Image: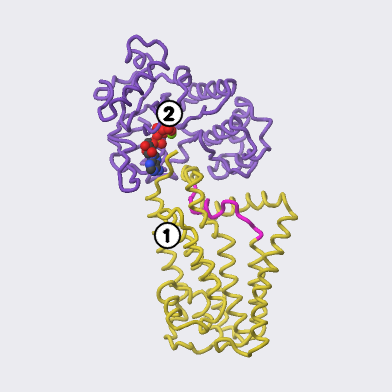
Amino acid sequence: MIIEVDRVGRTFKVRGSVVHAVQDLSFSVEAGEFVGYLGPNGAGKSTTIKMLTGILAPTSGHVRVAGLDPSRRRTALARRIGVVFGQRTTLWWDLPLKDSFELIRLLYKVDRKMFRERLDELCSLLGMGDFLATPVRQLSLGQRMRGDITAALLHDPAVLVLDEPTIGLDVVSKAGVRDFLRRRSVEHGTTVLLTTHDLGDIERLCRRVMLIDHGRLAFDGTVGDLRAMVPGETSIEDVVAHLYLSSRESPRTRPHRPAQDPPSVTA
Amino acid sequence: MVSPVRTYALLAWTWTRAAAQYPLSFTLMTLGGFVLGGLDAAVIWVIFANTTTLGGFGLSEVMFLYGTAGLAFSVGDLMFSNLDRISQHIKAGTFDAMLVRPVSPFVQVATDRFVPHRIGRVLQGALVLGIGLSGVHVPLERAWMIPVMVLSGIVIFTAIWALGGAAQFLLTDAPEVANAFTYGGGTLVQYPLSVYGDNLVRGVTFVLPLAFVNWQPGLYVLDLEDPLDLPHWLRFLSPAAALALALVAGLAWRAGIRRYRSTGS
Ligand SMILES: Nc1ncnc2c1ncn2[C@@H]1O[C@H](COP(=O)(O)OP(=O)(O)OP(=O)(O)O)[C@@H](O)[C@H]1O
Ligand SMILES: [Mg+2]
């Protein structure tokens, strides 16, 4: 298992009260899987991703990614994992895109020849040739996102974690990014975990979906299983909306049976 | 693992190249730092136009103390003062990005937007030190202390910046608190400590070890009596004081990172 999450909890103290961002969360991901991570706003998706990447330490439970405890072995893990935050860039704001990439090459000690090959491949797949010399702060959202995805892959990580990578992209850019992620997973065997509010991403990319709600795992299975959760609804939007809404009405209870007994994973 | 020194050089060089795209601005800022520093140092001449000693020290001795303090402070300022921007990085979310790279976040924060023009202040400190040294007699047996004290001073100031940075993990809104100690400390030790009250001198000797930047080792180099009559062995303690403070700062920094909680978005 390349990702193992075992009874993980994370709390935040906010002005005296305690927010349970993630509670008793357990799941594992096999190498090569492509997993979508769904959940309503504030469900705990980003918090989970920060724990997988070592940015946050869990307050309880254990996390292992690529055999490492992320918060303790952050720097070692950084070489094996690629991270994209759709909401903000991990590139250097004031540097031209190609300087950012060159810096990444040096920081990750990527061999010069491999770097050239990967960068050429990524550039042509993501259509980045036009703005390589532009400082990151002058890039449009979609251009920047392509830069961020490239940056996360230049060291050829075994695991790619993306928090809302398609946020704000136009249909063409979105299709490009999706196509790219799919090929990456198929051709390089990269394990991908992505969060999104765009169910098109899920339908087109993910064989497996996990749904988190109020910090707890509420569903884990295939897209087909997810549809079957709400009989009568045919579009995945409606199914997910139904699930989110019903949890809003009864936030104290765990929504739906699979929370207690998630269906076994079909990879 | 890329060594921190190499990482530092790499990142600082990248930002220097970025700054070099604006050579006029770079030249003006460097000159500006040098000239402002020169005005600051000129205060010494103004004082000595009216008197022959300051706190019991002659002109060249005061310039020696000013120069060593200025050199240590400005090198620290050039290389590590960006550590006081931690809270900005936390709020903007850029600190998250630093944590997912395979290099020390300490070095990343210190070098982020590294501005080479602060070198102007370093040159000014070195110049004043040179002028001061030309006016005092320092035999070779005691001159070895000069590089030792400057290095210790750099470490002491860096540690204070790191402590201030670590504090920002807890008090995201109080970067100015740390500045009081760094910039305040840098200004404080420019003049002979004998011009201040005894309690302050004891405080910066035994609590926040600023007296070890240049005062105690400076008394050794200049072969002078301590106006406060503190024991002579204190004069050799600068490296130990610097290391002890660096250790405290290192622990505080690690504790800060462990407590880091990112932002909600
Ligand atoms: N640094 C923090 N300090 C305090 N509370 C936090 C922090 N980070 C997250 N939270 C809280 O934890 C909960 C989960 O937040 P998280 O960002 O993980 O949600 P999310 O699923 O990513 O939501 P969204 O879809 O809106 O991005 C929220 O209630 C949020 O307010
Ligand atoms: Mg989020």
Q: Quadrant of the C terminus of chain B?
A: top left
On the image, the x and y values in percent for residue A75 come to 45, 45
Quickly name the residue at label 2. A193
Quadrant in which residue B55 is drawn: bottom right
Chain letter corresponding to the colour purple: A
Write down the chain letter for disc 1.
B
Residues in magenta? B103-117
Q: Residue at x 55, y 51 (%)?
A: B7
The amino acid marked with disc number 1 is: Gly
Residue at the location (54% across, 59% down)?
A: B80
Image chain in yellow: B
Does mark 1 have its CB less than 8 Å from ligand 1?
no
Q: Amino acid at mark 2?
A: Leu
Q: Is residue B152 left or right of residue A172?
A: left
**Which quarter of the frame holds ligand 2?**
top left
Front-lying residue, A114 or A121: A121
Residue B134 image position (x, y, % from top left): 67, 83
Q: Is residue B220 above or below residue A14?
A: below
Q: Which residue is mark 1?
A: B250
In the picture, measured across the screen, residue A166 lies left or right of residue B253, that is: right
Q: Nearer the viewer, residue A53 or B42?
A: B42
SS at mark 2 in the image: strand
At x 43% / y 43%, what residue is drawn? B263
Specify few, some or many for label 1: CA neighbours under 10 Å numbering under 14, 14-19, or 20 or more. some
Query: How far is mark 1 from mark 2, CA to CA?
Result: 35 Å
Q: How many marks?
A: 2
Visible residue check, residue A49: no
- Is B74 within the magenta? no
